[in-house]
Amino acid sequence: MRIAIAGASGRMGRMLIEAVLNSEDLTLTVALNRPDSPDIGQDAGAFLGVETGVAITDNLAALADADCLIDFTRPEATLTHLQACLEHGVKCVIGTTGFDEAGKQAIQAAAQKTAIVFAPNMSVGVNVTLKLLEMAARLLNSGYDVEVFEAHHRNKVDAPSGTALAMGEAVAHAWGEDLNAIADWARHGETGPRETGRIGFSVVRGGDIIGDHTVYFCGTGERIEITHRSSSRATYAQGSLRAVRYLARKDFGLFDMHDVLAS
């Protein structure tokens, strides 16, 4: 498959480019970046000292040369890229987080015309962790308070992270609840005793933390912690390539990493 990478000069974009170049069955054909990027016109493999013959561009018409786009940018950019994908018949793997409801609905609508894998986290380990959380939440559905903690690098702009939200949703779903109805997004001042059946969120932003997530089930006399820590973005890149290969067999539809891992 011919692969396009959005945000080609970013940390995740570069990790994806390296992963595609190291794969035997995928070919890098398009590298996209913002019009104001100083890297426009440079070879996409320059940071590796490799000449790929693919110049970084802001021209979305270049997507005509791709079969699938991998996008870990920002919601506004991703939705713009997605429209170009529809114009050129390109499939899409979306790891971008921070979408509002309108953005999510736009992705659902696009999936009626092309094949999309949309997941808040492409890591295989994170998606296994989500399954473990569902199991734990069903068994610990009373007598335990749940807190979701996450930490990321100082440049991450959305909070809580998409992965933290997915973890909260996994617990809420197991309880038969809507996360938005039972979430405590922040605490300040005299909050009073904790309400039963709520899910709390705590966020840290600092340094170069790639991604730490822990869900606490706090009971009387004991505490259960389910944790995932990322030490490299390579796990997201490899999960993304797995999603690309899954889409090779799909013409349209909206899928997540659970679909990919189950195939």
Image (spheres, helix red, strand yellow):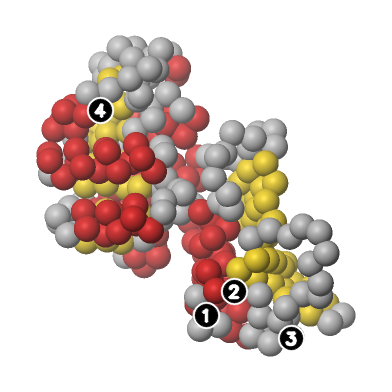
- For the residue carrying disc 3, how many other residues have a C-alpha within 10 Å: few (<14), some (14-19), or many (20+)? few
Residue at 25%, 28% in the rendered image: 30
| CB-based contact (under 8 Å), mark 3 and mark 2 | no
Residue contact between numbered discs 3 and 1, judged by CB atoms under 8 Å = no
Pointer 3: what residue? Answer: 143
Number of dots carrying numbers: 4
Q: Give how far apart the Cα atoms at labels 2 and 4 are.
A: 43 Å
- Expressed as whole percent of the image width and height from the top left, the position of residue 261 reads 39, 62
- Mark 2 or mark 4: name the one nearer the start of the chain: 4
Asked if 66 appears above or below 185 in the picture, the reply is above
* Labels 3 and 1: the sequence-earlier one: 3
Q: According to the image, label 1 marks what residue? A: 177
Q: CA distance from mark 3 to mark 1?
A: 16 Å
The earlier-in-sequence mark between 1 and 2 is 1
Mark toward the start of the polypeptide (3 vs 2): 3
36 is higher (above) or lower (below) than 246: above
Q: Amino acid at mark 1?
A: Glu
Residue 80 occupies quadrant: top left
Per the image, the residue denoted by label 2 is: 182
Estimate the spatial distance between the alpha carbons at disc 3 and disc 2, rounded to whole Å.
16 Å
Residue 214 point in image, percent of width and height? 68, 60
Marks 1 and 2 sit apart, C-alpha to C-alpha, by 8 Å
Q: Residue at x 84, y 82 (%)?
A: 220
Question: Tag 4 or tag 1, which sits nearer the N-term?
Answer: 4
Residue pointed to by mark 4: 30
Image-quadrant location for residue 82: top left
- Would residue 237 appear left or right of 93 to someone viewing this image? right
Closer to viewer: mark 4 or mark 3: 3
Q: Amino acid at mark 3?
A: Gly
Q: Are marks 1 and 2 in contact (CB under 8 Å)?
A: yes
The label nearer to you, 2 versus 4, is: 2
- Identify the element where label 4 is drawn: strand
